[in-house]
Amino acid sequence: MVVISGCLGNHWSDTTSPSPGKTNGTWESTGIFPPLPSTTPSHDIPNTSDHAFLASLYPPLRGELENNSIISKFYPDAAYTVHVFAGIARKRPLTPSELRILKITLQANNCYFSRNLPPSNSYYVVSFSEERPVESIPYVECPNFTSRLPFVYYKGRGFQYYPVTASNWAYHYLKTGEVKEAEALLGEMLPLMETANTSEGKAGVFRVYFSPPEGSPVPWTSSFSQGMLAGLYAWLYNEMGNKTYINASRLLFNSFYIPLEDGGFVENTGYGVWFLEYPYRPDFLVLNGHIITMKGLWYYYRFTGDERALELFNEGVESVRKALPDCDTGNWSLYSVNGPEAREDYHRLHIKLLLWLYARTGDETFLQYAEKWNGYLEKKGLEKEDINALLQQVRNTP
């Protein structure tokens, strides 16, 4: 499984779109811009002066900004990132990491929209490198830009570098033994990490620079990618012995001590500690995001022996145990605690994650809920998951 999770909330779903690089349905063969799509939300059309403003501050980006300004007249989605970073730059200077993110996001959008029509709906993942986890992920070839990172299209927001999806890809590589591919991707991410101060020392943070549909302050940080990447850099160090990776891992682990009001993602709830996939909504307790964050903590503990990670993991286990009754309708699982019903793919993911928790803790509660939720699939006439095969797979995975 390459994409464990990636949709912003339960309502953002995968869609099919025109294949990048093909001339059918594109304007690359004629150089004639198509008319502005009538479905583009007007509130997402950026102020065109944002391009000139950023170019005046950061002249090395002038060429990409000028190209983006032209493209965005026809595809406003392509300039969303310009609008976001101009808003930040009007308040404070952009950091070196932010300038790198701005540059690669400009390059990705300029390349894609100069060759293809916009994807039809949100959550469309592409690669700007031939090296990608699976060949079904569309490859977009660019003459002057290549990146191992995934870029995700969100309607009204263009293509975005998303640390959550990047952590999914890195996990896939390490799980399947493709260590060199994991190193290339995780190495490319390192310059995009910011640092912050915590009670435990300096912390590393992979921030998100786009706002979801319901709106949020930008940037924000997801527990999902922070936890998984802390574990994955530790795993990569175990494979390669490069101290750069263990240092990055420790910085990311320290981010669990950033207070919520200062951009952190750990909340104390009635169920206990909860790791927030979307910390701009501290009441939105996403089940899969919480458990996947715990997977990262478990990997971090396994490869570093840091008892603080085990303590956080055990606190997370207890909160899942307490919350499970409020994630169950009696006929289906919920995407979040007392929230909406999960899509089928997330319901199946819940089963797999509960089996992973059972395999790591031995707590029968998680096996019982996995079997119960598997039975809901059968009641709806859907194919059940193979519990025994999944358990064997979990036990054979590092």
Image (cartoon, rainbow, N blue to C red):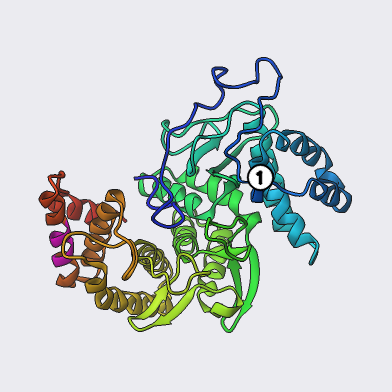
- Identify the residue at image location x=42%, y=67%: 300
Badge 1 crowding class, 10 Å Cα cut-off, few under 14, some 14 to 19, many 20 or more, is: many
Image check: 303 left or right of 125?
A: left
Question: Is 133 rendered above or below residue 373?
Answer: above
Q: Magenta stretch: dominant SS?
A: helix
Q: Quadrant of the N terminus?
A: top left
- Image quarter of residue 108: top right
Secondary structure of the residue carrying numbered label 1: helix
Report how many numbered discs are placed on residues in the image: 1
Question: Is 226 rendered above or below residue 310?
Answer: above
| Image location (x, y in percent) of residue 34 | 66, 25
Image check: 22 left or right of 10?
A: right
| Image location (x, y in percent) of residue 167 | 47, 53
| Image location (x, y in percent) of residue 198 | 60, 80
Q: Quadrant of the C terminus?
A: bottom left
> Is 174 or 123 nearer to us in this picture?
123
- Identify the residue at image location x=61%, y=33%: 37
Read off the magenta span.
Answer: 368-373
Image check: 331 left or right of 353?
A: left
- Identify the residue at image location x=30%, y=49%: 345
Which amino acid type corresponds to the residue marked 1 in the rendered image?
A: Thr
> Is 394 or 271 nearer to us in this picture?
271
- The residue beneath circle 1 is 105
> Is 87 or 310 nearer to us in this picture?
87
